[in-house]
Amino acid sequence: MTTIALQVNRRTVELPAEPRTSLADFVRDKLDLTGTHLGCEHGVCGACTVLLDGVPARSCITYAAACEGADVTTIEGLDEDEITTELRAAFTREHALQCGYCTPGMLVSARDLVLRLPDADERRIRVGLSGNLCRCTGYVGIVRAVQSVIEARRARSIAPLADGGRTSLGPVGSGRATAGRSEPRPAQQVLAPASESTTPGSIPDFTPATVLDQRFTLPHPPTKVFAMFDDIAGIAACLPGVSLMSPPRPERVEGSIRVRLGPIAAAFEGAARVERDPATLSGRIVGIGTDQRSHSATQGEIRYRLLPLEGGAATAVELSIGYTLTGMLAQVGRPGLVRDLAKRLVAEFAANLDRHMSGAPSGLTAAAELSFWSIASDVLRARLARLLGRRSEPE
Ligand code: FES
Ligand code: FES
């Protein structure tokens, strides 16, 4: 895992990624910038086109790690861009899209043509867009839209920009891979351990590969919820699949989590440490675990923060769940599905927590095994129902 620092849509981003992670996966999965579409994933269709240092580039065949220090602009970063605004209006006017799958990449490439072509020459526009495939429109509307924007801008005496802002020869972004980092990265901020006897060396800090943010509310005051979060055995009882292997201490909690994912069953055994900050009603649980059977290993961290609601009668719990998974289980699950699953799991945890705090008998809390399959089929059922519901709506 390498930490990559770059600018995305004028924002500084510093995140870990595998060396094999493409720039497209990096912006979609880690930054939720899903306007960058993936079609062929072989550099042919152009759906994934983004601006790399101001020049169109295929993000599916560009390694994120090769973009260290680069300036990346995705379609979301062109919301306020003057040329893209004119192109969007022209695409609408000229019926230059149907399903819209190719459109983000098409707009990024078209913007480059509007910037640098001296006039609205149809042949040059077609050649310029030949790396962006559209399965719907037949291109006529797209070419007309681009022509109309170039004509309008040249009529307003806006001159073409020679080379569209290119400053160096060679492929887009070339040289980035060898760009060294001149300054050391700032140290990661870590919450102070709650207990003096904590031995942080035993459970290392880490930078999670995936971070999911979740939020839920509980009808109990923040101080009561914070006290509940100190009851490690109680919290474990609310987490599906989790069981403790020995009496817990904040500096070391030993336990296991049983996970079933289709035919794969895993029982991660490991340890965690708990940190709390009463001043900010926040805390962190960081842990490591391995499963011998599936040869999978995980490091995980849950950060939480409690915020008062309804004048202190209720609590909003903000969770940031980070994890890195390696081995067989790491190969399963696209990030969108994992996010849905996390949402369902957190909802289950919140309901168990509420029952526990309201004094429900302990036998009614969490399931003994975390079954991704049952939750995943719920998620898929819900998605299917949404889709069919939309289809059956009257026109
Ligand atoms: S998805 Fe990148 S070129 Fe097709
Ligand atoms: S509008 Fe459907 S692929 Fe271009």
Image (cartoon, rainbow, N blue to C red):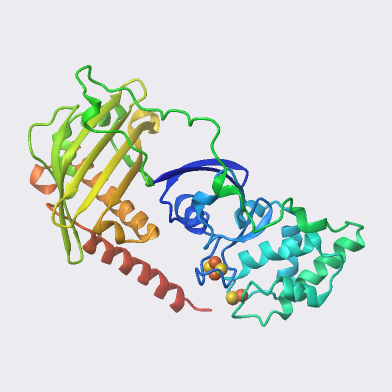
Residue 358 visible here: no
Q: Is residue 353 above or below residue 96?
A: above
**Which residue is nearer to you in this view: 74 or 152?**
74
Q: Residue furthest top?
A: 196
**Which residue is nearer to you in this view: 284 or 51?**
51
Residue 51 visible here: yes
**Which residue is nearer to you in this view: 321 or 18?**
18
**Residue at image point 76% right, 64% down:** 113
Q: Is residue 255 above or below residue 160?
A: above
Q: Is residue 187 above or below residue 110?
A: above
**Residue at image point 62% right, 68% down:** 103
Q: Quadrant of residue 357?
A: top left
> In the image, 87: left or right of 202?
right
**Residue at image point 27% right, 43% down:** 299
> In the image, 97: left or right of 237?
right
Residue 35 coordinates in the image, percent (x, y): 56, 60
How many discs appear?
Answer: 0
Which quarter of the frame holds ligand 2?
bottom right
Q: Is residue 364 above or below residue 92?
A: above
Residue 349 coordinates in the image, percent (x, y): 24, 46
Residue 324 coordinates in the image, percent (x, y): 32, 47
Q: Quadrant of residue 219?
A: top left
**Residue at image point 85% right, 59% down:** 160
Residue 254 coordinates in the image, percent (x, y): 13, 36
